[in-house]
Amino acid sequence: MSPSPRARRSLSPLLESQPTCKLRRAGFSDLSNAARTCSLAFDDDVLFGRLIHPYRKSYPRDVDKYWYRRFVVDFWDWSHVFLVTTEPAVDKRGGIVTGFAHWSRIAPGWRENYRAGWGLAWWDPRRLLEPIFRLLTRISTFLSPNRAASKEDELIIERSYDYLDHIWTGDRSESWYLECLAVHPDHQKKGHGRALVEWGLEQARKEGIACSVIAADGKERFYQACGFDVGPVGRAGEGEGNPLREVAGGLVFFKEKQGVVLPVREYGSWTYGLGVFDWDNWQNKVGRKSAEEHT
Ligand SMILES: CC(C)(COP(=O)(O)OP(=O)(O)OC[C@H]1O[C@@H](n2cnc3c(N)ncnc32)[C@H](O)[C@@H]1OP(=O)(O)O)[C@@H](O)C(=O)NCCC(=O)NCCS
């Protein structure tokens, strides 16, 4: 059996550029600490906190189950990458996870990921781990439900998946996509978030593909500052019947693959929705840019 592609990727350049925190691939044993960090970081978030977990104050530890169950199946999919930041003094695999990122390599099919070194051969027995963990997760959800979650909205994200497929097409069909990013509230504004984002941007650049994210409400400027310089190109709540329609935020940003410039998406019904993003300023900038291009 050839060594796992996971083991072959080096993180050293990022470690050197982040003297205050340590960035490394997450081990399976990090996932429960990562789940705790996500519960704390998203506690007041409009989607993961307030909408999905209205009973989180009564059952704070149950929110961890939500996050853990999201990660524990994908962890065994070789096209997903889990990263943590830790403070060196407390990093003993069991110490505090100060930051966490879940990246996935979006592609039209598993073959593209396999060819790029992010998949297992069809005969590889490690492929069995994902369905096994999916089954175990179903059983544990049945035996130990998440009491902090709303029954109607616990799976609202899963129900909205198909509405955005049109965005990851053409030059954007292969992309490193940031599924989840969270920094422990006690460790924010120390560069951990940026280091976790830089991994995906750098990996996409090396592979010559795009990089993408759906920003939570109010986090748009953070991602733009990190390097996602194209967008919004979509909104998580767009499309007739999308259950996320009334949820604030969810704007999609890209770092395009090198050399690609795509037309700006026109302002329209897809921009409908609540949130702090300054659409007037965006329209002015877009208008100015196209005027410059035509002079
Ligand atoms: C968003 C989040 C991950 C940022 O992590 P962080 O470690 O605090 O961010 P960093 O310290 O790496 O900040 C990088 C840069 O972004 C800026 N920044 C951070 N949060 C910002 C925000 N909400 N709005 C605008 N800029 C922001 C920082 O000032 C910094 O700029 P600088 O490098 O010019 O000084 C963190 O606040 C968090 O976990 N929030 C709750 C969960 C969440 O919303 N996750 C994102 C879901 S899409």
Image: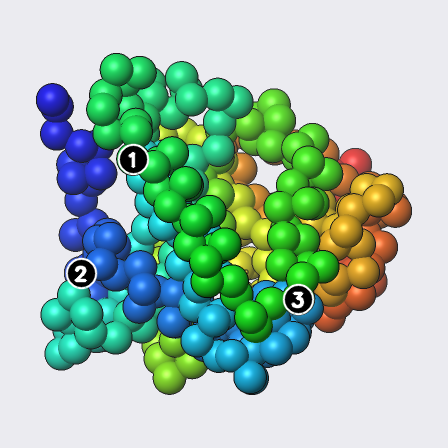
- Looking at the image, residue 204 sits to the left or right of residue 16; the answer is right
Is residue 218 among what the camera can see?
A: no
Find disc 1 in the rendering and name its residue: 129
Inter-mark Cα distance, 2 to 1: 34 Å
Q: Amino acid at mark 3?
A: Ser
Inter-mark Cα distance, 1 to 3: 30 Å
Q: Nearer the viewer, mark 3 or mark 2?
A: 3
Residue 237 in the image: x percent, y percent? 75, 51
- At x 43%, y 35%, the residue is 105
- At x 59%, y 52%, the residue is 214
Q: Amino acid at mark 2?
A: Glu
Q: Amino acid at mark 1?
A: Leu
Find disc 3 in the rendering and name its residue: 150
In the rendered view of the protein, which quadrant contains the C terminus? Answer: top right
Helix, strand, or loop for circle 3? loop
Q: Earlier in the sequence, mark 2 or mark 1?
A: 2
Label 1, residues with CA under 10 Å away: few <14, some 14-19, many ≥20: some
Observer-nearest of 188 and 74: 74
Q: Which mark is residue 16?
A: 2
Helix, strand, or loop for circle 2? helix
- Looking at the image, residue 280 sits to the left or right of residue 27; the answer is right
The mark tally for this picture is 3
- At x 52%, y 22%, the residue is 108
Circle 1/circle 3 CB separation < 8 Å: no
- At x 12%, y 70%, the residue is 92
